[in-house]
Every structure is written in structure tokens, then in C-alpha cells.
Image (cartoon, helix red, strand yellow):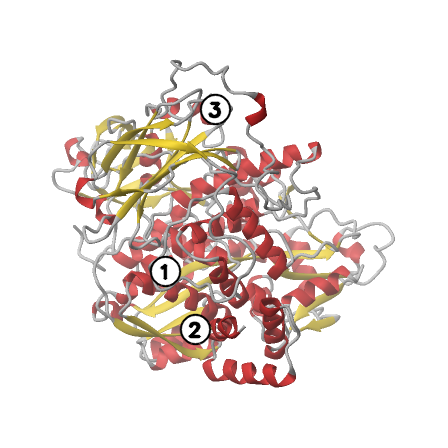
């Protein structure tokens, strides 16, 4: 057997970097191509106890999706309790990650009752700072790490940061349901959100992103959450490369409010969580090399619609030698079948089993195939 | 194109990981994927199951009982109108075939590259070593399927071994030999660490089953219902009339001799349960290898487990819970909860995740508490007061007084944990 964390382990800088967003793309090998699927969460009208004929195809489709999903879930191994574990850990992080972390730790404690998790500081930046000050902290972050983050951690006491993607939060571009737009290219997407300036392509009107009809000559109105929200930070990081974001027409307190506002604004556009769609909005398919990829559950699971915010846990790897196996077991649980289902129950997406295997190689050392 | 930033090849090659890939291949990979993507396991087409893998079907149809004795009046109701539970029709879920395969080990350590799985180490005495695999060899394909990281995805050696190996542990590899620099087809005979449990299933009235009926047999940890056993469940299609054979290939590491185990079994069609084992059969963890014969009874209108309206103070005491039968009622309960709390139908994966939760011995009340403390529920409220007001309204069906609200607000701020406060609210109401 290989020595744990031996020379075959990949250097951290690469890990921390590259694991942001890799998950999006590994196409889930079992999933059905998105072009052949319909949204699973769409409203289906049917009287109790019957399936109207029109829904038979949808029911068959659901069965197929269910089969692909079952195969995905069955490909993730259940948690295996290797030994008894005792100890305490502090979990700090974004409110999303604190909530998810609480769910995971509750389930984890069923296997290991003598483990205690305490709640650390709230907020992504504060959590990273806490980890830099105290390497025993586990930081939960709901955005990709930056070079500055890593430098900050290393200049503090967290000399050996290890970042593990633990779940995915799919986002989609939404417009009013009557907006005739049929798809958007990455360039058009960028032009909507990038602030106007020198040599910047900024889509001020709907015609700028190729939309015809009555709406063409009307301004694009962005709906967004506050400057500090994870989603807005994500848009800036991933679409604008930390550039300035165009002024929003309206700022909202919750992601659901963003979706609602778009639903009542014919010229509205915004990015919100995939699960938050209302009947008055529609998700815009991405156009990549001429192919339209609709935002469906399957497209997210298969990595085809890559608009996914990764949720990460960051630990100081050197702690793993002295914590009696707590961090390793906790991460193994999170990447286990129930851990991933727990993420689903909290409203997030599970990861591709193949990607999970790669992460497990990093956490527990290379695993034998 | 900044979206190209989203694409980093998921390979373990350090150089590749560190660099963004060129945007020109951004869409290409996805298109290739869309063309190639096929469900690897033909779970959606049960007739192929077994045949494609050389894996013997565990369902053995019998023709010894006449099927004509099954009167029309007792035909199975596919629409579940007789269950007394409203089906709001939002989503229907039946059990999906789960092939129960042994966990075959080649005995190698690998890194995924764009040409295949690069062997970094071979375990002494392993099947891989006996077949002649050495470090720096690259396993290019397993059973005809390409592996490694390519087209913006990873196809894992372990997953392909699981899918392609026959019931005797044989699989054919395509290997790039490091020394001779040649591609070679390499037949391998692998070892398994799985333990096997076999048995037969009889139905009491021996009527003919409808087309597409499936038999589910599951080994459960009765002491710790949350502790799922790797390979402990098989879902196979059954035809005609009983008896049927089943085989579980579970991982013995998941078995704790100090725990109690049990076997559940049921036959269902669509999401209607047709037959079930009346009582779970207790299984001694030391006698797991012995064959088991099960007799299933006709289900009486489906099993109502873990469902019903949101009751008060019905949390499970500690860990002592009985494991529920998965049934269609669960998915209806999940539907109802989603409409109640999140005002939408659950997605396919959410239905699956919650069914698994409820089958693991958790109550519908537990589910309510979890849903209300989930980020997706909390995100709907702009402040804690609005959030708590909704929580109290949903759990007690009344508008809380200002005094009540400020009490819980104080609790929320003191504990910093919605889960704790929801637990307390559920207990109070």
C-alpha cells in the first residue's frame, strides 16, 4: 500500500485551484443527454390518481431519469465506519455551508456519537480568516477559492490547505417567460453583466443579445442580490473575472425575490438558483458552438450546463495526522452516498461518482481499484 | 470568453490542471459528450440486464402455476386509487433496477490521464499483477469502454470494472504496455471481497405478476438503520410466477457482528407494492452466508410507513426505530411536504434522497424540521423574523403572537442554529 499523503499526493496549489469547477464538467457518464430530457421539476397538471395520456411520455421520461439517477447514487459508496472516532472540530463558513455542515455533522454523529462539532464564525471571508488564524478550524466556502485566499491562508497558520468540493449549487440565467430569447452564448452572457466602459461589450438593449420583436429596442434590466451575496460574488468571479458588474435595475434581499421580480418584469434578467424558478420565468438555454443546452436537472447532473457554484470545505491537511481520523472520516462521510443525498435534501446537487473517487484519493491517499 | 474558465480538464496531470483549456474546445467537449453519452448500465431497459454483462439474471421465471386463476376484479391498481392517500400526481417513482454485482478488485493504483488510467502501483499477489500489469502501463479501455479523463469528463476504472466484469470476475482490458510500447488486449480474472447471500422468494397466492414487476431484497442494519450496506440491496425484474431467486453481494466490512440485521423483500410494479414480507426476517450477522427462503404476502393497499399529516411530538426516540418499507406512499408524502414547505414539486433526485431518508428510519417530522432549516427554505425570507413566523405558521397552523415571535427570535439569536430552534418549536407546538 502506498504511504498516506506520500509523494503521489498532488500538490496543494493545484488541488485548491483546479478542483474549483472541475466537477461541473465531468460529465456524468450515466446521465441522459440534456437535449433529450425535460425538466423534472416542472409542474404537471393531473387529477389525483390518474395519469392523463399527455403525461405518459413525461412519466416514461421520469422513469428514465430515475434510472440514471439511481445508477448515479448507487455508484457512490455508502459510508464505511472504519473505527471509533472521538474529538471536536469547529466549522466556520458561509451561512449556506453552516446549514449544510450542520446537516452533515448530525448524520455523521449517528456513526460517531463521540464527535462534537461547534459552530464557528459566519461568513466566507471570516471563515477563511479563522482558518488562517487557527488551523484546527474547518472552513466552509460557497465560492471558488482565489489565489489571494490561498496566499492568505499560507501566510497565516494554515500551511497546508486542502480544498475539497463537497456539493454543487446549480444556477441558471432567468428571463420573463414571455421573453422570446431562445438561447445565449457565453459572450452574450458576459456582455449583459459586464459594466459598460472602455472597449467593453455591454448589452444595454435586448437586441444586443440577438433578441427580436417588441422587446428588442428595450433596455436589459438586471435583477440581482446585494453586492455581498454569494451569487453576486460568483457572477463577478466566474463571468466577469472580478471585473465590474453592470448596475442592476433592482437589488433584492433573497434569491427567490430575484426570481419573482424577473417574473413580473418583461425586460428583466438575472441569475438565481436552479430550484427557485417560478412559473413566470424561464431558464435560458446556453448556446455552445451552435448547440442549445437547456437548464435541466439532467443537464446539470451531466455537467453540460456548467453554471454551477461549487461548495467547498477547506482544512489544514497537516491536522489530519493528529485529529484521530476525524477530518478524514468526516470528508469520507460527506462524499459517501448518504452524505451526497444529504446535500440533495438541503437543495443542492450531488457530484459525479468518478470525481468523488478522485477526491477520495486526495483525502485518504490513493485507493486501490 | 470567460466561460472557458469553467472548464478545467479533470485530469490528474498537474500541468493540465493548472491551465485553463482553450475556449475553442469548450463547446466541442460538450458536443462530443452529448453524442457519446449513453447510460452505461442499461437500467432503463430491464430486458438487457444480465445479458450485456454475462451476469446471470437472478430472476428465474417458473411456469408451473397457471396464471389464469387471477381474476380481473383483483387486478393491481396502477393508479393507486385504493390507498386512501391522495396522489397529487406531481411525481411518480417506482423502484429502479439496481444490479447487484460483486466488488471486483484488480489490485492497482491509478491516475486518470487523457489516454487512460496510468498504473502507479500494483498490489503484490493481486489479479493485476498476475495478469502482468506493471507501473507505468496505461489501461486504455475496460470491456471495450474507454476510460480516463477526456471530453471534459472522467470515466473511472473502478466504475467500468463494476459494469463490465462478468459473474466469474473475468474482464478484458486494453493496455498500453510501458516497456514494449504496444497496445495489448489483456484478459484478467479478478478476485472479489464481496460476500454472497442467496435465496428464493415465493409468493403466497402465486398469481401471475404484471409485466415489469420488480423484486427488491435488502439487507438492513436493524440496530443502525442509517448504516447502509454496500451491495446490500438488489432490485431485479421478475416475470410470470414465483419462485424467484435473489443474490446479494455485499461488502462484509460493513457488517458489525454486534449489530442486528434483517432482510426485507417486496415485489412492486410501477410504484405500487404488490407483495411484501409481512415481517422483516432477522438475520444473524454470523450466519450471513446461509441461503434464505422468503414467502411474500399480498400487500394490503400498500404499507403506510413514515407518512401521514404532520403530527406533533412524534419524533423517533433515539436510535431505536423500525426500518420502514419503501413504498409509493413515501414519495407522495415527499410530494406533499415539498408543496407545503417549498411550494413546488420535488425533483427526481430529491424524491430519491428523501425516500432514502425516510426508509432509514426517520419520521416525516424529522423531514419537516430538515426542510425548514435548509438553505433553500431559509433563503426565501429576508429576515429572521419573517422566517420564524413562517416556521410557526407551518407547524402549528396559526399566526404567532408578537410575544411568541420575539421569544423564538431571541432563541434563534442565542443558539445561532435554526435546527435547534425548529426542534424546540416542534416540541412546544
User: Do the residues at discs 2 and 1 belong to one chain?
Assistant: yes
Residue at mark 3 to residue at mark 2: CA–CA distance: 61 Å
User: Is there a contact, CB below 8 Å, between mark 3 and mark 2?
Assistant: no
Q: Place residue B396 in its image quadrant.
A: bottom right
Is residue B389 in sight in this rendering? yes
Left or right position of A46 against B307: right
Q: Residue at x 49, y 62 (%)?
A: B365
Which residue ends up furthest to the left in the rendered image?
B125
Q: How many marks?
A: 3
Residue located beneath label 1 in the image: A15
- Residue A1 or B211: which is nearer the viewer? B211
Q: Chain of mark 1?
A: A
- Say which element carries label 2: helix
Q: CA distance from mark 1 to mark 3?
A: 53 Å
Q: Which residue lies under the disc numbered 3?
A: B209
Q: Relative to residue B14, is residue B120 depicted above or below?
A: above
Amino acid at each position: 500500500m502506498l504511504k498516506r499523503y506520500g509523494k503521489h499526493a498532488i500538490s496543494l496549489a493545484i488541488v485548491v485551484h483546479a478542483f474549483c469547477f472541475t466537477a461541473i464538467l465531468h460529465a456524468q457518464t450515466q446521465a441522459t443527454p440534456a437535449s433529450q430530457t425535460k425538466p423534472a421539476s416542472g409542474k404537471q397538471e393531473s387529477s389525483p390518481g390518474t395519469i392523463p395520456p399527455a403525461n405518459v411520455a413525461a412519466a416514461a421520461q421520469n422513469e428514465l431519469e430515475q434510472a440514471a439517477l439511481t445508477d448515479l447514487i448507487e455508484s457512490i459508496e455508502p459510508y464505511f465506519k472504519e473505527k471509533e472516532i472521538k474529538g471536536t472540530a469547529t466549522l466556520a463558513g458561509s451561512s449556506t455551508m453552516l446549514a449544510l455542515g450542520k446537516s452533515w455533522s448530525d448524520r455523521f454523529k449517528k456513526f460517531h456519537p463521540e464527535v462534537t462539532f461547534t459552530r464557528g464564525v459566519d461568513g466566507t471571508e471570516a471563515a477563511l480568516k479563522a482558518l488562517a488564524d487557527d488551523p484546527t478550524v474547518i472552513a466552509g466556502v460557497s465560492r471558488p477559492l482565489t489565489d489571494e485566499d490561498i496566499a492568505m491562508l499560507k501566510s497565516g497558520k494554515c500551511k497546508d490547505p486542502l480544498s475539497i468540493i463537497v456539493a454543487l449549487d446549480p444556477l441558471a440565467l432567468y428571463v420573463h417567460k414571455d421573453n422570446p430569447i431562445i438561447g445565449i452564448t457565453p459572450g452574450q452572457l458576459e456582455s449583459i453583466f459586464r459594466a459598460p466602459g472602455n472597449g467593453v461589450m455591454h448589452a444595454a438593449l435586448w437586441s444586443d443579445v440577438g433578441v427580436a420583436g417588441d422587446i428588442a429596442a428595450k433596455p436589459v434590466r438586471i435583477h440581482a442580490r446585494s453586492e455581498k451575496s454569494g451569487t453576486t460574488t460568483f457572477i463577478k468571479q466566474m463571468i466577469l473575472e472580478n471585473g465590474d458588474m453592470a448596475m442592476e435595475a433592482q437589488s433584492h434581499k433573497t434569491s427567490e425575490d430575484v426570481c419573482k421580480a424577473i417574473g413580473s418584469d418583461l425586460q428583466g434578467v438575472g441569475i438565481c438558483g436552479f430550484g427557485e424558478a417560478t412559473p413566470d420565468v424561464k431558464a435560458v438555454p446556453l448556446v455552445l458552438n451552435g448547440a442549445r443546452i437547456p437548464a435541466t436537472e439532467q443537464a446539470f447532473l451531466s455537467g453540460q450546463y456548467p453554471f454551477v457554484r461549487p461548495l467547498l470545505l477547506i482544512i489544514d491537511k497537516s491536522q489530519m495526522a493528529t485529529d484521530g481520523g476525524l477530518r478524514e472520516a468526516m470528508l469520507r462521510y460527506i462524499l459517501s452516498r448518504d452524505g451526497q443525498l444529504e446535500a440533495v435534501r438541503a437543495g443542492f446537487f450531488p457530484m459525479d461518482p468518478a470525481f468523488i473517487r478522485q477526491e477520495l484519493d486526495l483525502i485518504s491517499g490513493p485507493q486501490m481499484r | 470568453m470567460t466561460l472557458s474558465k469553467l472548464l478545467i480538464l479533470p485530469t490528474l496531470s498537474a500541468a493540465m490542471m493548472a491551465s485553463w483549456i482553450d475556449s475553442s474546445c469548450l463547446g466541442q467537449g460538450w458536443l462530443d459528450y452529448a453524442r457519446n453519452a449513453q447510460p452505461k448500465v442499461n437500467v432503463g431497459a430491464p430486458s438487457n440486464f444480465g445479458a450485456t454483462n454475462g451476469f446471470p439474471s437472478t430472476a428465474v421465471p417458473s411456469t408451473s402455476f397457471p396464471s389464469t386463476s387471477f381474476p380481473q376484479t383483483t387486478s393491481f391498481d396502477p393508479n393507486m386509487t385504493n390507498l386512501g392517500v391522495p396522489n397529487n400526481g406531481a411525481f411518480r417513482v417506482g423502484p429502479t433496477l439496481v444490479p447487484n454485482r460483486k466488488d471486483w478488485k484488480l489490485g492497482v493504483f491509478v491516475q486518470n490521464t487523457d489516454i487512460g488510467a496510468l498504473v502507479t502501483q500494483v498490489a503484490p499477489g493481486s489479479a493485476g499483477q498476475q495478469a502482468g500489469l506493471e507501473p507505468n502501463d496505461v489501461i486504455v479501455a475496460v470491456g471495450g469502454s474507454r476510460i480516463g479523463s477526456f471530453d471534459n469528463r472522467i470515466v473511472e476504472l473502478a466504475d467500468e470494472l463494476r459494469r463490465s466484469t462478468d459473474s466469474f470476475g473475468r474482464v478484458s482490458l486494453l493496455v498500453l504496455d510501458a516497456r514494449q510500447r504496444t497496445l495489448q488486449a489483456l484478459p484478467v480474472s479478478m478476485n472479489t471481497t464481496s460476500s454472497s447471500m442467496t435465496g428464493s422468494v415465493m409468493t403466497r397466492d402465486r398469481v401471475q405478476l404484471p409485466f415489469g414487476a420488480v423484486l427488491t431484497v435488502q439487507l438492513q442494519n436493524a440496530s443502525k438503520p442509517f448504516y447502509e450496506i454496500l451491495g446490500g440491496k438488489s432490485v431485479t425484474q421478475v416475470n410470470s410466477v414465483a419462485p424467484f431467486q435473489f443474490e446479494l453481494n455485499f461488502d462484509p466490512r460493513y457488517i458489525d457482528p454486534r449489530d442486528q440485521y434483517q432482510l426485507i423483500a417486496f415485489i412492486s410494479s410501477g410504484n405500487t407494492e404488490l407483495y411484501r414480507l409481512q415481517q422483516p426476517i432477522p438475520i444473524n450477522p454470523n450466519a450471513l452466508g446461509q441461503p434464505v427462503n422468503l414467502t411474500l404476502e399480498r400487500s394490503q393497499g400498500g404499507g403506510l410507513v413514515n407518512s401521514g399529516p404532520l403530527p406533533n411530538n412524534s419524533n423517533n426516540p433515539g436510535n431505536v426505530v423500525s426500518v420502514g418499507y419503501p413504498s409509493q406512499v413515501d414519495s407522495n408524502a415527499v410530494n406533499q411536504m415539498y408543496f407545503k414547505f417549498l411550494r413546488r414539486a420535488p425533483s427526481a433526485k430529491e424524491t430519491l434522497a428523501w425516500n432514502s431518508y425516510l426508509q432509514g428510519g426517520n419520521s416525516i417530522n424529522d423531514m419537516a424540521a430538515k426542510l425548514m432549516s435548509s438553505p433553500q427554505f431559509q433563503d426565501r425570507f429576508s429576515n429572521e423574523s419573517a422566517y420564524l413566523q413562517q416556521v410557526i405558521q407551518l407547524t402549528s397552523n396559526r399566526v404567532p403572537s408578537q410575544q411568541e415571535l420575539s421569544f423564538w427570535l431571541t432563541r434563534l439569536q442565542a443558539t445561532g442554529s435554526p435546527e435547534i430552534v425548529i426542534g424546540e418549536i416542534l416540541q412546544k407546538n
